[in-house]
Image (tube, grey):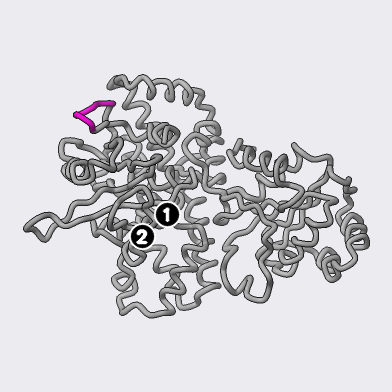
Amino acid sequence: MFERKAFTQLLEWKQMYGNQYAAMLEGARRVGKSTIAEEFARREFKSYIKVDFANVSGQMLEVFDDIANLDVFFLRLQLVAGVTLYKGESVIIFDEIQRAPLVRQAIKYLVADGRYFYIETGSLISIKKNVKDIVIPSEEHKIPVYPMDYEEFTWAVGNQSYSALRELYKSNRSVGNQLNQKLMRDFRIYMAVGGMPQAVQAYVDGRNFEYIDRIKREIIQLYEDDFRKIDDSGRLAQMYEAIPSQLNANKKRYVMSKVLRKRTTARDKEIFAELLDSKTVLISYNTTDPGVALNLTKDVNSYKLYLADTGLFTTLLFHDESEVYADIYAKLLSDKLSVNLGYLYENAVAQIIAATNRKLYYHTWRKSNSTHSYEVDFLLSSKTKIVPLEIKSSSVRYHESISVFAVKYSAQVSRQYLLSQKDVKNEGMLMMKPIYMLPFILEEL
């Protein structure tokens, strides 16, 4: 069982909100929600019952036919589960709760009863057809669960140097060429494996990248099967598969009409909303007038999409190269791939930022007397200032966009960062950091 940061959030929920709210772990499928919920139940409660609505017996389903009399309901639940519940010391887990909307609706009454704690897990939880006939309970304390972030990955693989790396970051000193190369290779392993627990477990078990890649392809197929259940036209899966190619096209936004090869309809926009609801993707909005409240000037029609997991992005990027995966991974880890991988590193940055529960924003603006544009890859808020980030996969010699941005918005900019594979360096107010130091930047904001 991997250590996950969601444990800390669940502990806070139990101590501060557990008598008023059910904890709702929500996120994409296969990110570890069920495992986290059950492991937390084992650690923190005297007993627990887990009801998995994706794989539930008819006998258990009958228990939920009548929840009006809670005394009888709890007795029947304990008898079918073969578990004794203790008042104030037990938790009931409703796994894949989106499959049982009426049970989800009853959370209001279960929480108000006060006998036990409740944890729900859900995927595609806000899809309208799953909740259209129920009153969504307000008694839910939502805890987003993402694929494993880089720190969680280092915990999983037994890398004990993360704290030392944090101290090195704080010193603002050079890492050193050989050590930086080693640390970048460690980070590229994370980019290759990703943060899906199944893939990470395979890596920890010493499996080769052929095996790991097969796991990731199976997860992608699982997602696309889910998409086709929601949209049998295949457009939802098409939107998902097109994310790497849309980033590779070096456009300033994701263009749905280019993906679908037709004019965008109202139904296409509904399908797109369902893609966002699936939590399998991350959306970054173009903010037209950057300020501290980035959300106020976001352009809802101008956005980029990233995959929620960079490991899946890597697999989807080379989806048609199944016969040469070993060579691809070897070259990726040694930084010898011939293709420009700037957008792969962008996806890694997007994942790291999103894992801190921050929304994603970027900014583009037209160059004077030119048809070309400047672009700052990511914008972050820091108190009353904004922090621009520019991402480079290799050379850091040219960074015109972030430099012009810092001048144009000098009153709003506090710090500016260029993230790449290169060692620590400063050029005036521009701080250059290796990409694996991004988590420590976010900790300071």
Q: As shown in the figure, which amino acid type bears the numbered disc 2?
A: Ile
Image vertical order of residue 253 relative to residue 40, above or below = below
Q: Which residue is mark 2?
A: 243
In this view, the residue farthest toward the left is: 369
Task: Identify the secondary structure beneath mark 2.
Answer: helix
Residue 99 screen position, x and y as percent: 68, 67
Residue range in magenta is 424-429
Image vertical order of residue 59 relative to residue 3, above or below = below
In-front residue for pair 265/407: 407
Q: Which residue is drawn at the image coordinates 35% and 31% (left, top)?
A: 184
Q: Earlier in the sequence, mark 1 or mark 2?
A: 2
Q: Which residue is mark 1?
A: 307
Q: In this view of the protein, can residue 419 be seen by the observer? A: no
Residue 230 screen position, x and y as percent: 54, 73
Q: Quadrant of residue 395?
A: top left
Q: Do residues under tags 1 and 2 come within 8 Å of each other at their CB atoms? A: yes
Q: Which residue is drawn at the image coordinates 28% and 55% (left, top)?
A: 289
Q: Which residue is drawn at the image coordinates 29% and 71% (left, top)?
A: 258
Q: Residues within 10 Å of mark 1 (few under 14, many from 20)?
A: many
Left/right of residue 205 with respect to residue 249 in the rendered view: right
